[in-house]
Image (cartoon, rainbow, N blue to C red):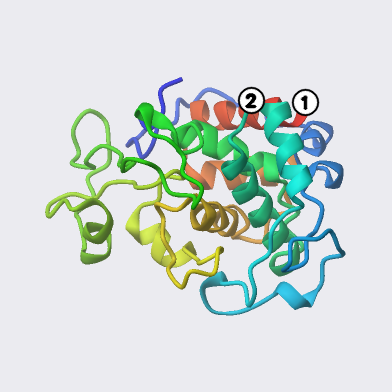
Amino acid sequence: MAFLATSWLAGHRSGAPVEVPTSSLVDVVDTAALTVPAARPDGRSGTPGARGATAARGRASSVVNPDPRWVTRTAERTGIPAVAVRAYGRASILAARQLPTCHLGWTTLAGVGLVESAHGTVGGAALLPDGTSSRPIIGPALDGTDGVAAIRSDAAGRRWHGDESWDHAVGPMQFLSSSWERFGADADGDGVADPTDLDDAAWGAARHLCSGGVDLRRGPDWTRAVLGYNDSDAYLRSVLSAALLAARR
C-alpha cells in the first residue's frame, strides 16, 4: 500500500462507480459492539455522559481513556500498535459524547490511520508512547506537479512542515493546515492541538469525518464522510478494507 502517496491528488476521482457500502457492511465497521467501551476520566469503564464534554476546539474538560484491557486485547487481536488503538478509542469516546448523532466507530479511524501513515509508523518511524512518531511524517509538497494540488504554504502550516513555499499534509492522519485550523483539537490534555500527535490527530479526524451532519451507520453517509476526508475512489476502498479488517480480526 502506498502510504502518503494517495493524499491530496488533484483530479483523482476515476469517474468509475464506487460501490457504496451497504448499511449492514457499515454496521460491521461502526456497530456499537465494536466501538470502545465508554471510559471515565480515570480510565475505568462507564456510561457516556456530559461529564467529558466540552469546550473550545473540541478539547475535553478532562482526559478520557479507553479501558486499558480493551486496548491491550484489541492491539493483540488486530496488530495495531496499542498507542494507536488508545488514540482511536479515545477519539470514539469523545465523538460519542460530543457528536452523538455521528455514530463514529473506532475502526473507521483505524482505517484512515492505516492508509494515511500505517498508524504513525510509515517510512520506518516508530509510534512513541506519547502519540508522536520518532520521525516527522510529512507528505509531498503540494506544488502542482505530478498530479498533486497546488497549495501555497501559510504560517500555520510552516510551523509543522517548515516549507516556506508549498503546503504539505502532516502527521499520522495527514492534515493540511487549513483543515487542522478547522478540526484540530487537544485530546490528551497537554494544552496543544498537535497534528503530529496521534492522540490529537485521531480526534481531529473524528471531528472532520463527523462534519456535515452525517450518521455513519448509513452507507451513503459513511462514503460521503470518507470522500470528504480525501476525495479519491481508491482511498475510499482502501479505508473501507482496512476498517473491515480491523473489525473482523
**Amino acid type of the residue that numbered disc 1 sits on in the rendered structure:** Arg
Q: Nearer the viewer, residue 228 or 17?
A: 228
Q: Nearer the viewer, residue 34 or 26?
A: 34
**Amino acid type of the residue that numbered disc 2 sits on in the rendered structure:** Ser
Q: Earlier in the sequence, mark 1 or mark 2?
A: 2
Q: Secondary structure at mark 2?
A: helix
Coordinates of residue 163 in the picture (x, y in percent): 16, 51
> Disc 1 to disc 2, how far (Cα)?
11 Å
| Mark 1, residue position | 248
Horizontal side, residue 141 vs residue 5: left or right: left
| Mark 2, residue position | 241
The residue drawn where x is 70% and y is 65% is 99
Coordinates of residue 157 in the picture (x, y in percent): 26, 58
User: Is residue 31 depicted above or below 195 in this figure?
Assistant: above
Disc 1 crowd, CA 10 A, few/some/many (<14, 14-19, 20+): few
Image quarter (top left, top right, bottom left or bottom right) of the C terminus? top right
Residue 222 disc label: none
Q: Secondary structure at mark 1?
A: helix
**Can you name the residue that lies furthest to the top here?**
1
User: Is residue 145 depicted above or below 229 in this figure?
Assistant: above
Coordinates of residue 98 in the picture (x, y in percent): 69, 69
The residue drawn where x is 36% and y is 40% is 8
Coordinates of residue 197 in the picture (x, y in percent): 45, 53
The residue drawn where x is 54% and y is 69% is 189
